[in-house]
Image: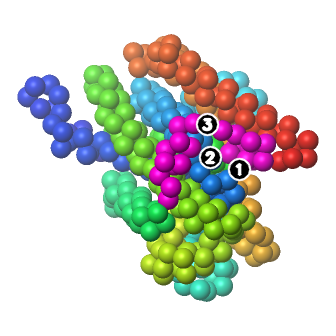
Amino acid sequence: MSLPRIAEPPASPRGGWRSREIWLYFGPAFIASVAYIDPGNFAANIQGGAQFGYLLLWVLLWSNLVAMLVQFLSAKLGIATGKTLPQLCRERFSAPVVIGLWLVAEIAAMATDVAEFLGAALGFFLLLHLPLLTCALFTAAGVFLILAIEVYGFRRLEHVIMLFVGVIAVAYFYEIVLAKPDWPQVVASTFLPRLTRSSAYVAVAMLGATVMPHVVYLHSALVQHRYRPDDPSHSLRHARYELWDVLVAMNASWLVNSAMLIMAAAVFFRGGMHDVSIEQAHQTLAPILGPASAFAFALALLCSGLSSSVVGTMAGQVVIEGFLNVNFNIFYRRALTIIPAIIVIAIGMDPLRVLVFTQVVLSFALPFAIIPLILLVQDVKVMGRLAAQRTTAVLGWIAAATIVALNAYLIFLAFAGTA
């Protein structure tokens, strides 16, 4: 995926950078963060809040901590090497391993495409009340238009994505103001982990929706347009500012995710509606919280679907070009990946169930992105002086082990007939 380079801001006389210049380094993590507030998150968080109230808020907190660690390591890998994670996997691992990683990444990309495209189509459907298949065609046109913005500079595309993130955030904070949640319960559930057999499936779906494998690959590419191979000292400064980018963007996405679940718990769980579809959620909000709330919900879903569909396409481009070392036109890829989503819409599958299932698929694919990442970032030969410290590597392995354990638990529940 070809990304134009953005010029480095001039250094201040003291050898550091003026605070206003940090803005020029903000963007990559915000693009990655879109995947953390995509339609899959809407589905998983609404289902989690409607079925279990505030119980699973802690999943979002811990998932966000993992997301911040993983996304920063991915960005750091790109900053240190000037290459993407898939490219380095191709160079460092054996051919069978690379093919296996690529296949899992493509499955994750397909699941992501279905979820994001379907979400945007639902957003158009809720706002325009047109047939869902017609809305799917509107979504396709919208995604192509947003992708075309890159022709005018990658920074313009970053700004458009950041605008979408802002709209989603404002819409959901407006929702929870109207919903009047039980704040003591919110705080307790955020910091006190509890997991029941019945909530495990949704918890894993929330994890898969929050820590997305395709943007683990993508983030290492997003930092490339600020990469300066002619200035070795630049990588340390770049990494420091990318850390701030990650902290701000990922915590913003965590707050938005939390707002989704809090709203669902305060409105649906409290009202005894434990099994609601996205359309039912939209219809229910109007009489309970007012028409403006329903409009905000639909608008947020539309912005989420459009922006995350663009990001998913970019990630798929990085995956196929990096693992297979081929050039593939991004517009052709978007055209091909539209097909499964349109099939899902045309045969009338339940959108909420499809969205939640795709997030579980993503959770199972996640270790196949995180484990190679940790192996590479702790390798001094790859990273040089930006190699991960032992503590960071240990935290990464703990995160990967936790995800694998949750997935194994879900498999156990499925075979036991309780998932």
Color style of the picture: rainbow
Q: Magenta segment: does it hold 62?
A: no
Amino acid type, residue under disc 2 in the picture: Leu
- Across and down, in percent, residue 49 comes to 62, 56
Report whether 97 appears left or right of 309.
right
Mark 1, secondary structure of its residue: helix
The part of the chain drawn in magenta is: 181-204
SS of the residue at dot 2? loop
Residue that badge 3 annotates: 193
User: Dot 1 corresponds to which residue?
Assistant: 202
**For the residues marked 3 and 2, what is the alpha-carbon distance in whole angstroms?**
8 Å
Earlier sequence position, callout 3 versus callout 2 = 2
x, y (%) of residue 209?
62, 49
| Residue nearer the viewer, 296 or 320 | 296
The amino acid pointed to by label 3 is: Pro
Q: Give the labeled residue for mark 2.
A: 56
- Mark 1, Cα crowd under 10 Å, few <14 / some 14-19 / many 20+, is many
Indicate whether 376 appears above or below 70.
above
